[in-house]
Image (cartoon, helix red, strand yellow):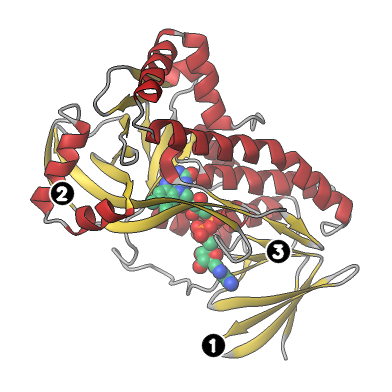
Amino acid sequence: MPVKQAEILIIGGGPVGCVLALALTQAQRSVVLIERRALAAEPAPGAYAFRPIALSYASRLILERVGAWASVPATAIEQVHVSQLGAPGRTLLRAADAGLPALGYVTDYAALNDALTARTRAAGIDWLDRAQAEAVEPGSDAIGLRCSRDGEALDLVGRCVVHAEGTSEGMRLRSYGQTGIVARIETDPPARHCAFERFTPDGPLALLPQAGGYAVVWSLRDTRAETVVAAPDAAFLEALRRTIGGRIGALRAVGPRAAHPLALRERASRVAPRQAYVGNAAQTLHPVAGQGLNLGLRDAWDLAEHWRRAPDPGAADTLGAFAAARRLDARVTVGMTDALLRSFGSAHVLMRAGRCMAMTALDLLPPARRFFARRMIFGPSAIP
Ligand SMILES: Cc1cc2nc3c(=O)[nH]c(=O)nc-3n(C[C@H](O)[C@H](O)[C@H](O)COP(=O)(O)OP(=O)(O)OC[C@H]3O[C@@H](n4cnc5c(N)ncnc54)[C@H](O)[C@@H]3O)c2cc1C
């Protein structure tokens, strides 16, 4: 049976796995990326379904540091307008509130993945694509990883395995009974640099400016989502117009729609003997606040920082220090996403009045806006 060796074996060549591999390579660590997809040399246009990703300014800094940002197609978000359906009160967060040129950037998951894959190839990182990781076998000073590739077994040996394979088994699940509908719409006038977040009793609606149109991420109760995703284009646009009102102009066209079940999934511990979990493999968030990948990129960056000078990346004390360092960021980000869903999901009259007051207060208090915006962008730990 063929055996392959590298210091760090990363399962999953999604955005988090790629960023980790690039940061580790810069730190002179040897890595191999194991990915079950086939890496086509030139992915065919339209090969993947559209899925928008809002990247925070902190994620831009991480992508710049690994040399990938310049090839990520991105639309800057300069303002975010937050409101709720059927009640007064709104907040307008501006990039200037956070003292930054943009609050974030909108890109497409597939385009981001392609840019990162190309960057890892240019950096000479070893990929094992079309390979499914199947079992890990931790030892005292090394760890084995069993894979299958085109029906053939393949063994890998390293000092540590990183799980960057996305949502996987063994995670605690909290369902919100919601489905996320994703689509791209065209409007008149075209979208510029303002994003909209509108809370409704059915779930939040996000409209993200992307290349002149808006990416729609609309969370709805499962039963309503089934009807809305399958509705004819005109009926879909009319339902959207009733929810967002006239603030984005006339809704002209909608592209193909996709539905994603939404839930919070968390792993009890992000480390195990000679193993670490990052990105969606550690925590999978509801996309209401667009924080899942941003948190995952901070996981990857922090892990690479912990390993910069570590003699043994799989040592229990190194992994323990990494887990301790990530606890606050993960707790705050998961907690904030959960609190947003609970407080804005309630139609109770007192909750609605409280939300109006909170949004108005945030709108009137620049220091509060600055704190809130920077916390959403950087997490509790300062990336720069
Ligand atoms: C509708 C929607 C909207 C979202 N919007 C945002 C947003 O605006 N901002 C934001 O920050 N986040 C957003 N997210 C979340 C974001 O998409 C995820 O957090 C992010 O994709 C996680 O990246 P990852 O690399 O950890 O995992 P993934 O992107 O899931 O990548 C995992 C990779 O591992 C591979 N893999 C899996 N199992 C194996 C195996 N056994 N062996 C080998 N390879 C394997 C997969 O093929 C894949 O390439 C959104 C999510 C959804 C559903």
> How far apart are the two marked residues, 3 and 2, measured between alpha carbons?
46 Å
Query: Residue at coordinates 29% horizontally, 44% vertically from top-left?
Result: 215
**Is label 2 in a helix, a strand or a loop?**
helix
Nearer mark to the viewer, of 3 and 2: 2
- Which residue is painted at 75% across and 40% down in the image? 325
Q: Which structural element holds mark 1?
A: loop
The CB of the residue at mark 3 lies under 8 Å from ligand 1: no
Does residue 71 appear in this view? Answer: no
How far apart are labels 2 and 1 at the CA level?
42 Å
Q: Residue 367: x percent and y percent?
A: 52, 10
- Precedes in sequence: disc 3 or disc 1: 3
Amino acid at dot 2: Phe
Of the 4 image quadrants, the one containing the C terminus is top right
The crowding category of the residue bearing disc 1, from other C-alpha atoms within 10 Å (few below 14, some 14 to 19, many at least 20), is few
Residue type at mark 3? Val
- Residue 268 as seen in the image, left or right of residue 107: right
Q: Is residue 108 left or right of residue 251?
A: right
Front position in the image: 308 or 379 = 379
Q: Are marks 3 and 2 in contact (CB under 8 Å)?
A: no
Q: Secondary structure at mark 3?
A: strand
List x then y, in percent, for residue 328.
69, 36
Of the pair 146 and 229, the residue shown nearer to us: 229
Instruction: Tell me: 354 left or right of 87.
Output: right
Residue at 40% x, 20% y is 94
In the rendered structure, which amino acid carries the disc numbered 1? Asp
In the displayed structure image, the side of residue 45 where residue 263 appears, left or right: right
Q: Which residue is mark 2?
A: 236
Earlier residue among tags 2 and 1 = 1
